[in-house]
Amino acid sequence: MSHHQYVLTLSCPDRPGIVSAVSTFLAHNGQNIIDAQAHERGIKLIGATAHYVTSDLDEGPIIDQDVERISHRDTPDALVRKGRDIERRVLARAIRHHLDDRVILNGRKTVVFMD
């Protein structure tokens, strides 16, 4: 669901085969908070999380996460660009781990076997 504004409103069962990536810039209501709060408050790190899709929006078992340090010199557009780059990396790694059978579900957590 990365960079899409779609939310499933129908009953959505847990889907351990479907992977989603979420930027840390997305508030719980799905609104982008970069220009309004993050830049003004001088955040120092941005990141993204890739997880399995569950019926609870953005609450599935986490497969991968990454962060990047940012500077006061970064514009809101630069933050968006960096956030998207991080999302792409995290999503690519999570899908690769899933396809290589390196992810084991353990309740609401995952165990990921790295290289």
Image (spheres, rainbow, N blue to C red):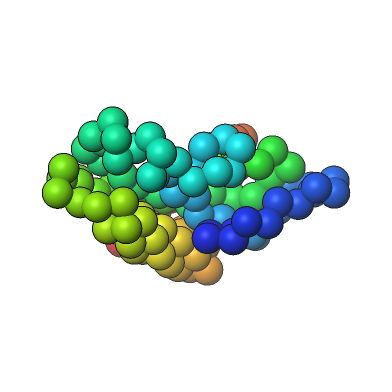
The residue nearer to you, when weighing 109 against 4, is 4
At x 20%, y 51%, the residue is 74
Compared to residue 107, the image places residue 103 above or below, namely below
Res. 83 in view:
yes
Q: Is residue 44 left or right of residue 5?
A: left
| Residue at the outermost right position | 10
Q: Quadrant of the N terminus?
A: bottom right
Q: Is residue 87 left or right of residue 59?
A: left
- Residue 97 position within the rendered picture, expressed as x and y whole percent measured from the top left: 45, 62
Give x and y (percent) for residue 107.
Answer: 61, 35
Estimate the x, y position of residue 34 in percent, counting from the top left.
39, 44
Q: Is residue 79 visible?
A: no
| Quadrant position of residue 60 | top right
Residue sitting at x 49%, y 46%: 32
Tell me which residue sits at (24%, 52%) in the image.
75
Q: In which quadrant is the C terminus drawn?
A: bottom left
On screen, residue 99 versus residue 56, left or right, reads: left
17 sits left or right of 100 in the view: right
Work out whether residue 111 or residue 74 is closer to the camera in this orientation and state it: 74
Whether 42 is drawn above or below 75: the answer is: above
Count of marks, rendered view:
0
Q: Residue at (70%, 51%) from the top-left corner?
A: 7
Q: Quadrant of residue 30?
A: top right
Coordinates of residue 48 in the picture (x, y in percent) = 40, 49
Camera-side residue: 11 or 17? 11
